[in-house]
Image (tube, grey):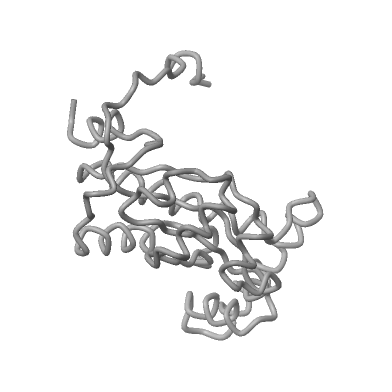
Amino acid sequence: MDKFMKAMNFRHACKVFDDSKVIPNEQLLNILEVGRMSPSSMGMEPTRFIVIRDKDLRERLKEVCWNQIQITSASEVIVLKTLIQPLLPTSNYARSMLMGKSKTQEKQEKWIKSYTNFLHSMQSKGISLENWAHKQAYIAASSMMNYAAYIGIDSCPIEGFDIDLTNKLLGLDTFKESIALIIAFGYRIREQQKRHRLKLDDLVEYR
């Protein structure tokens, strides 16, 4: 088994962290860098990261996260939020991201048109801009957790939170941005329980 596959077997949703152990800052920065380098649809890079270190804020965050102990026992808690309004084709952010894909104005306008048509197609199928943006955050989250496991750091993705209260707690303008999920990082305090996964043959078909 190679090192990455060992990391995938090591990774699990750690529910209780050892609050006496701290992730070295260099490794935290690497985890964040992996999130930054993760792919995103149309290369729009909508995901942003809030590292929650203030103890009082952690306690209040725990309350709106259904009192999950990971929030206060983890070494680091990272909130992944995503842009919304800046992703509209008419925004300065969207245009700057799209125009950077080509040097000629003609090709830049083609990118903008393609992006606009792409969003319209999604919305016609009932997929909101916010929902699409949240999917990009999950790509980054997966990369970050897998990398963390590779270097021996545990993690736990957290979707169980009151999104309205959490947005309010962090002072987010929900017209411009929204929280996608929260990830706790640290070191397990007890051994990992056996995981149950379906067999590969139950999940894969070849055509």
Q: Is residue 30 shown above or below 17?
A: below
Q: Does 39 appear above or below 147?
A: below
160 on left or right of 117: left
Q: Nearer the viewer, residue 113 or 94?
A: 94
Query: Eyeballing the image, is 81 above or below 199?
Result: below
Would you identify the image quadrant in which residue 150 lies? top left
User: Which image quarter holds the N terminus?
Assistant: top left
Q: Is residue 196 visible?
A: yes
Side of 59 relative to 166 (left or right)? left
- On the image, the x and y values in percent for residue 6 come to 22, 30
Q: Could you tell me how many numbered marks the image carries?
A: 0
Residue drawn at point x = 27 percent, y = 30 percent: 190
Left or right, 80 with respect to 27, comes to right
Judge by depth and name the residue closer to the eye, 202 or 23: 23
Give the answer, above or below, for where 2 lies relative to 76. above
Residue in the foreground of this view, choosing between 117 and 69: 69
Residue at 53% from the left image edge and 45% from the top image edge:
67
The residue nearer to you, when weighing 175 against 168, is: 168
